[in-house]
Image: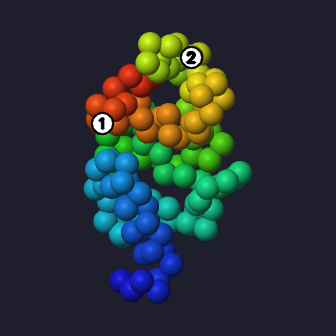
Amino acid sequence: MSWTDTNYRDYMDQKGLARRRNIDWQLTYEQWLSFWGNDIEKRGVGIGKLQMCRYKDLGPYKLGNIFKDTHERNCVKWHHNGIEIDNVYYNTIGEASRELNIIPQTINWRCKSKNKKFEGYKIL
């Protein structure tokens, strides 16, 4: 593949993002292309865009553990869990986000981080 191929760049970007989030990536470029199929132009971030999601937001990105969902529904999942941050309970990640002025994605990442600095972050 060539870096001039937009799809290949997108594949490498998504694979790199998973690595930065410490999520195992077990998809070849061909598997990734097949997964997206005719929806490849609909993928992205923003209203109406499709995202690659993992079941229960757990495990690796691999066939059998991924599905497509809209950006809106993928984000809503983050707002329906009780959460505890440093012994303070919040009904949702969204509530904690507003109260602490931290974006929901950061709170979600900290909850899943193995970094001892964030051991007070727990999704309930």
Q: Position of residue 32 (x, y in %)?
A: 40, 63
Q: Position of residue 5 (x, y in %)?
A: 47, 83
Position of residue 18 relative to residue 82, above or below, is below
Q: Residue at x 43, y 61 (%)?
A: 14
Taking the image as shown, residue 99 lies to the left or right of residue 20, namely right
> Which residue does the numbered mark 2 point to in the structure image?
90
Query: Between marks 2 and 1, how big is the CA–CA gap?
Result: 21 Å
Question: Which amino acid lies under the numbered mark 2 shown in the image of this protein?
Answer: Tyr
Tag on residue 115? 1
Position of residue 85 relative to residue 2, above or below, is above
Q: Position of residue 72 (x, y in %)?
A: 66, 42
Mark positioned earlier in the residue sequence (2 or 1)? 2
Q: Residues within 10 Å of mark 1 (few under 14, many from 20)?
A: few
Q: Position of residue 49 (x, y in %)?
A: 65, 55
- Res 94 seen here: no
Q: Residue at x 57, y 46 (%)?
A: 69
Q: Quadrant of residue 117?
A: top left
Secondary structure under tag 2 reads: strand
* Residue situated in front as seen by the camera: 120 or 54: 120
- Say how the picture is coloured: rainbow
Question: Which amino acid lies under the numbered mark 1 shown in the image of this protein?
Answer: Asn
